[in-house]
Every structure is written in C-alpha cells, then in structure tokens.
Image (cartoon, rainbow, N blue to C red):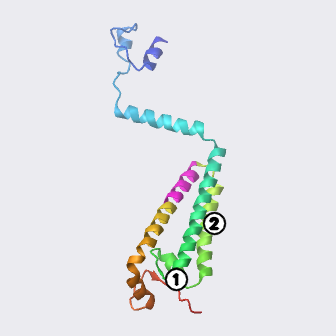
Amino acid sequence: MTSLMAHSLGGIRDAQSSPLPSHQAAKLPSPRITLNHLRALCFRSFRRELDLVTTPQQRGRRVIWIVLCVALMCLGDLFMTLEHARMIGIFESNPIAREVMRAQSPEILILFKGASIFVGCALLVRLRTARVAELGSWAALAVMTALCIHWQSYSQGLGELTPQYAALSSGAFQCDTWVHWDSKP
C-alpha cells in the first residue's frame, strides 16, 4: 500500500526519506517528467474529456448541424457557378465539373452537383454518431469555407480582369479551363 501511494505521488520522495526498504525505494519512478510523459498525459486527458463530454447523441446532433451548413455552402457554390457560367464565364479547375459544364446545360450541372452534395451529406448523416463522421463533417466544412473565401477573392478580382474576360468570352483567346455558356438557344 505504501509503495502504491509513493508511486501515485510520482516518486516525489527520495529514497532516504521514504519509509520503504532501500531495495523497494530504488524501484520508484524518478520525479523527472519528460516531454513524452507530458504529451501522453495531455492526450490521455484530452481523449478522456472527449469521451466524457460527447455522447453519440450529442455527436449526431453536431454532425447534422455541420452537414446542414456544408449543404448550404454547397448550394451557394452551385448558385455562383451557374451565375458566372451564364454571365461572364468561369475558370473551372475541377476537370470532371469542367466536362459537365461543357455540355452547356444548367440541368446537367444541377444534377451533377446535387447528386454529389446528396451522396456526401447522406453518408455523413448516416454515420453521424461515429467519430469519423464528425471528423469528415468538420473537414467538409473547412473545405467549403476555403471555397467561399476563394469565391470572394475570385469575385473581387473580376474588375481587374475585364479585358481578359472579354477576350475569353468572344472566343479570341483559348484556354482549357475556361467555360462560358452561350446565352443563345
């Protein structure tokens, strides 16, 4: 019992002041704490906190709210893509979306993006009580936030590139990533 108490105190007492025999006192851990000990203690307590605070029901609610935010941001991205493709054109860096957009059909683009949004969100909602779903939903939110920031900078830079956009829209200049929907039927 005394050995257990001395061990739980972290070996603060040295071997001379310990009431333990010298051969037992030598086996006590040293009071020196290394970086690995601190790291293990922090991660252990962090994991314990997550386990105590988060129940599967709480995680599920949190994932649903995050997925709703992601879905709204995806719909905003779809709206911006449709508007830019119809009005002035757009540089589309995603090769799959670029090929879908080259069909010049808003319906096909809406189906493609809508199906992508639905499959991704449905998968996260289905697995909502699992930690991996929460991590995935936070990652999706981070990606969509970065995309919204990209749209902001893209929209602000349009004013500076008006002559280049006019050349791209007229067909005088060719670019592989440029997509513009003709407004003619």
Q: Residues within 10 Å of mark 1 (few under 14, many from 20)?
A: few
Q: Is residue 14 above or below residue 140?
A: above
Q: Rounded to the nearest whole Å, what is the CA distance between mark 1 and mark 2? A: 27 Å
Residue ID for mark 1: 87
- Quarter of the view holding residue 106: bottom right
- Quarter of the view holding residue 178: bottom left
Q: Which mark is residue 174?
A: none
- How many marks can you see? 2
**Residue at x 39% of width, y 32% of height:** 38
Which percent across, then down, holds residue 170? 44, 91
Residue 135 among magenta residues: yes
Residue ID for mark 2: 118
- On the question of residue 3 being in view, the answer is yes
Helix, strand or loop status at disc 2: helix
Which percent across, then down, holds residue 110? 61, 76
Q: Is residue 29 left or right of residue 121?
A: left
- Quarter of the view holding residue 76: bottom right
**Residue at x 38% of width, y 77% of height:** 160
> Of the residues shown, which amino acid type is indicated by label 2?
Phe
Question: Nearer the N terminus, badge 1 or badge 2?
Answer: 1
Q: Give whichever of 151, 143 is nearer the camera.
A: 151
Q: Nearer the viewer, mark 1 or mark 2?
A: 1
Which percent across, then down, holds residue 117? 60, 67
Specify the segment rendered in magenta: 131-142
